[in-house]
Image: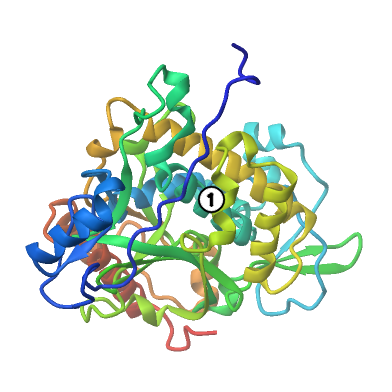
Amino acid sequence: MSSSSRPISQRTVHVPPQQYECSQCGKNTDLRLCVCREELYCSLKCQKIHWKSTHKIVCAGEPDLIDLMSLHPLLAIHTITKSPGITALPDGANLARVITLGDPLPTIEIGRRLEAWWPTSASPASRTKLLLRILREGYLVPILTALCLGLVGEIYTTTDDPAASRHGDSPNSNAIRRLRLKYRSSPISDFGIVKGSVKSVCQLKLAYYLPAECKTFPGQNPEDHYWLYFTTLKGEEIFLDYGLYSFDFGLLVETTPYRQPFLPAVDKAPGYMCGDRHDTTRDSFTTHTPKQYFPFLRDKRMHHIHEQGLDSLSEGHNVRAIWAFMDRVAARECTPAEKVLAVKWAEYNCGALSAIVKDPGKCWKQWPQEPGLGIHPIDEAIEKELGYTFPAHGDHTQWRPLLKLTETYAQGKISAADCTKGYMKWKSSHSPSNTAS
């Protein structure tokens, strides 16, 4: 039978519980989860009543769980994408690090001879870092939308995967074990995109000057920033930000344990994870200022997109739903480039996550519970401009506090969030007093 004539069963997005209350009586204390982690009960009596009347026919048993901390570096790999070029923007970016653009170079030429791209760079390291910053400029809305589509489509539909029939399974069996996200001991109850702002020194922003047209194009704006949020059933909130590298925030996550043939072969990727805002040991939320939340997992308008699997993602009605969501997030009509990229990246993310979910070896069980971290120091070229007092690169004594911090994390004595907090404090101690824009 040809693939075009095979019947494809409809997939369903399974939304986890959001209210911390007993599924039978509504009590909100002394609760425990059903083994499926999708119902809560205050007592065995309530569980038995609800089981007989409602839950027995839908309970799918114990799922495999992926902790958000372990998943974080995999998502960071997925954000490594090449910018298709600079789009003309309004003039007037006067508070930024201006990059004067020369004649265009073919992409293949840049890969072979990076020095031809920026021949006046102070060092090869500065040249490489600036290129990486530019490659990550903008396109946060399509990048994050594509990540959300991948997570919903390939994790929260695993109970009803249409590929079951293609693997020779009976219609009532599941080819893929049910998979869900958690953070620490609590299930993820929702996730989506946050629109807000981040603190950034003006000179750490980028802008582009085109002499031939005498025009200036502003780069990524820290006042119009976007990141992912996740909430747990216990009310915890976690931020994942993959757009800070453009502002020279050089925190990286180790990605080597996540290597797959279909993913970019990189050892580290920019990524920043903020812990729960209610945890007094973390001050990450002083960096980010949320302004508006856009739920994705619980948005029913996004659910029908995944009903027929990856093959239907680019169909007209699904594409229009994706673009409408992006327009709501950006509070404007997204550009044609943003719209096209969102769909292409969503197809890529769904395909890659699908391959991981279907891995018979369950590769996610080998992922580290606490991802490794790396640090790219601030560009030497702007240390002097901003008045930073970082030690000389050969001064091992002065760099020792930062090295000790990363060693302590590598030994498992502190969490990734605490390591991030320590790095931010160390960087702040070497910064000028007026660090906020």
Question: What residue does disc 1 label?
Answer: 149
Give the image location of residue 162, x and y in percent: 48, 32
Q: Residue at x 21, y 64 (%)?
A: 40
Residue 95 appears in which quarter of the rendering? bottom right
**Quadrant for the N terminus in the image:** top right
Q: How many numbered discs?
A: 1
* Callout 1 crowding tier (Cα within 10 Å): few <14, some 14–19, many ≥20: many
Look at the picture and state if 201 lies above or below 301: below
Observer able to see residue 43: yes
Tell me what residue is drawn at x 70 percent, y 58 percent.
323
Residue sitting farthest toward the top: 1
Picture coordinates of residue 216 (x, y %)? Answer: 80, 69
Q: Which is nearer the eye, 13 or 128?
A: 13
In percent of width and height, residue 185 lies at: 18, 60
Seen at 19% across and 57% down, the residue is: 409
Q: Is residue 168 above or below residue 114?
A: above
| Residue occupying the far front of the picture | 53
Quadrant where the C terminus sits is bottom right
> Dividing the picture into quarters, in which one does residue 2 lie?
top right
Instruction: Assign a secondary structure to mark 1.
Output: helix
For the point 40% across and 52% down, the residue is 14
Image coordinates of residue 238 in percent, x first then y, are 35, 68
Label 1 is placed on what type of residue?
Answer: Leu
- Horizontally, is 110 left or right of 167 in the view? right
Q: In the image, 56: left or right of 241?
A: left
Residue 119, visible in the rendered structure: no
Residue 256: quarter of image:
top left
Asked whether 171 or 282 is in front, the reply is: 171
